Image: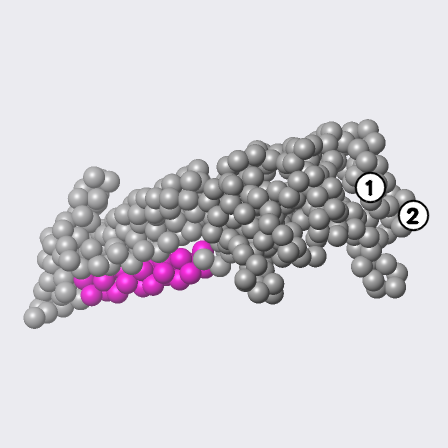
Amino acid sequence: MRPARLSLPDVLRVGAAGLRTRPTRVVLSALGIAIGIATMIAVIGISSSSREELLRQLDRLGTNLLTAAPGQTIFGEDAKLPRESVAMVKRIGPVSTASATGLVRTSVRRTGYIPEAVTGGIAIQAATVELLRTLEGTVQRGTWLNAATERQPVVVLGSKSAERLGITRTGVRVWMGNRWFTVIGILEPMPLAPEIERSALIGFPAAVKLLDFDGHPTTIYERSAEEAVTDVRSVLPRTVNPENPGEVNVSRPSDALAARAAAAGAFTNLLLGLGAVALLVGGVGVANTMVISVLERRKEIGLRRSLGATRGQVRVQFLVESLLLSVLGGVVGAALGTLATVGYALSRDWPPLVPPWAIGGAVGATLVIGTLAGIYPAMRAARLSPTVALSTT
């Protein structure tokens, strides 16, 4: 006689019946799988959303901005850029706009009664009128420097410097270099120039006249055609300082955002490891549940064997139960991880992004965990003798 074969719907029905009889244990066991899967998907999703936001920032801000700053002389002293270096940079063919800032050795305070040493981390910088256009920045409140105001005792605050000074509107006066300056503008944040966010900006002529500024720029900003960035970068040191090009440091601010995106990927690997540990613990919980289930259901196994079920059919039954238990946890975990990603991304104004391969990997991981967790219990159940199983009290 040949034993009857169970169809796939019958196998699933028999496996699901074993889970329905112990709902509390099933929920607790599936919870371990769900936590591991949710952690992994949330980590991948949040990291991908953050990286997508950084890439969108790069697209908006452009990667064609270069900066030139003084390095050190051969004697180890701080070098200086020539006063005419900005005009020289503008003569480079592909350069569309160039501007500069110069560090002024003084501090900005709300009143003259505050000690001069209390700077709040705010730098005073002279700025050319073209700076805002070069950085593609915008004014949050008020106005930017122009040909008239760059000669007057007025100041434009970066976003963070305004926050640290507690200034939210224009028309307020601040104390700089033993005299009052009027705030005429507050800038929006500038991701490619965070040093501007922490600065108080005045015109070059006003800095020379009122604050004893020497007129040497400390940072030159230039934008050129996207396809010409590499060429401009190679000639920029010789253009800025023809006599000592080795004393000029050239950088590309967009590289910092790209590095942040790469660093986010490295951090993701660490968190994925933690999620894998949680998933492993969940798999051990499933295996433990299935082993206990085999011990508790020996009479059921003996009855099925005595009614004609083969060892293979018993083995498949418990393996399917383990797979269903793991898939249940995986589906719940994938849903929780996706919701966590969407909620966090929207709270940070990021584009929510959950890569499809993350969902596919979660399903694959649950199937692997379910199979591994169910192999031993299924083999143990199949080895039980019908007579011994039925005689168990």
Residue shown at 84% from the left, 64% from the top:
76
Which secondary structure dominates the residues rendered in magenta? helix
- Counting residues from the start of the chain, the first of labels 1 and 2 encountered is 1
Q: CA distance from mark 1 to mark 2?
A: 12 Å
Q: Which residue is mark 2?
A: 243
Is residue 281 a member of the stretch shown in magenta?
Answer: yes
Up-down relation of residue 310 to residue 139 (above or below): below
Residue type (three-letter) at the residue carrying disc 2: Glu
Q: How many badges with numbers are in the image? A: 2
* Image side of residue 227 versus residue 48, left or right: right
Q: Which x, y percent locates residue 296?
A: 14, 65
Mark 1 belongs to which amino acid?
A: Ser
Say which residue appears at 21% left-offset and 44% top-offset.
Answer: 12
Farthest residue toward the bottom? Answer: 393
Residue 167: x, y in percent?
48, 48
Q: Nearer the viewer, residue 133 or 11?
A: 133
The residue tagged 1 is 85
306 falls in the magenta region: no
> The magenta stretch spans which residues?
272-294
Query: Which residue is drawn at the image coordinates 18% and 42% (left, top)?
Result: 10
- Residue at the (28%, 63%) spot, across then down: 285
